[in-house]
Amino acid sequence: MTTTGPVAGHTRPRPAHAAALTGLLMDPAVTTADVPGGQLRSRTGRFHRIAVVNPAGDRAALVILRTADTRPDPDALAPVVAAILDHVPTTPLGDASPALNGSSVHTRSVMRRDDRDPARQADGAWQWTVPAATIRVDRHAITVNTPTAYLRIAFDGPQWTPRSVAPVLDAALWQLAAPKARHMTRTTTPAGWRRIADVVLGTVGRDRTGGHAYSGQSTALCSCGEATTWDTREAARRANTRHRADVARAAADAVAGGTGARLRFKAEILARKAQFAAALSRPARHR
């Protein structure tokens, strides 16, 4: 088993981002704020509009936010702005719009389900869901709809690609989707049988001689960023099961208030298992 570090996508905002957003969202008199990597310009009305400007002075993205609360939490929006500034090009963006492929954004996104492919809409956009959130990606924008918030991020400049947009989407979903969306697990498909020459030389094709090698390795991935590689896909699935159980246990401990509740919970589970084993050991009755 090999373990990798956290998957890129959950950008941690610098304090300057949260401080700048606090001024922009809470004080109507504040309309501009300088942050590391660019500048923020806001306009507040029915929606909160925040333009993210890159170091070259071009608008890189326009963030439109509407929430049930008239004063949204700046700390919730700070990671999204940080992700935009971390992936925006520093050179002039030009007048052309990006041409995003929603399917590619979905594939590169970390916070996605394993068994839910995006659906192509009649207007060419792509749409999919995660717990408590619906995502829509068209050629130049992403939209996240939740029961309590609406977020749309329009990107400017052809330099934006699915590789740079996916971390922005992950940051938005981490903040706006349901808490269980932070631990959606999936596994990768093993490579299977391959020619040894293909593995060593990186070539592909048919009608070549040479021995074959089998690789059953699979990576267990979670939308929280954890990634571990195992020898078989079944082992990767078991790792995901353990990870979800650990997360649920930690959440239960936090709610119940410590190890005492955890020990009582374990004792209850063991008692139920003993009852079930006793029921199975009873001789069957024949008519």
Image (tube, grey):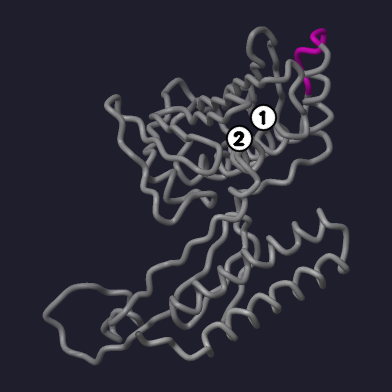
The answer to which of 286 and 228 lies nearer the viewer is 286
Residue 207 x %, y %: 11, 80
86 displayed left or right of 281? right
- Residue 283 position in % (x across, y down): 48, 91
Q: Is residue 245 left or right of residue 209?
A: right
Residue at position x 60%, y 58% in the image = 7
Residues at discs 1 and 2 in contact (Cβ within 8 Å): yes
Q: Residue furthest left?
A: 207
Q: Residue 255, image x and y in percent? A: 81, 53
Q: Check residue 26 for magenta coloring.
A: no
Q: Real-space Cα distance between discs 1 and 2?
A: 6 Å
Task: State the quadrant of the C terminus.
Answer: bottom left
Q: Amino acid at mark 1?
A: Pro
What residue sits right under mark 2 in the picture? 90
Range of residues picked out in magenta:
28-33
248 w.r.t. 24: above or below: below
For disc 1, the marked residue is: 55
In the picture, the quarter occupied by the N terminus is bottom right
Please state which amino acid type lies under the numbered disc 2: Thr
* Residue placed most toward the observer, 246 or 153: 246
Q: Please name the predominant secondary structure of the magenta segment in the image.
A: loop
- Asked whether 44 or 146 is in front, the reply is 146
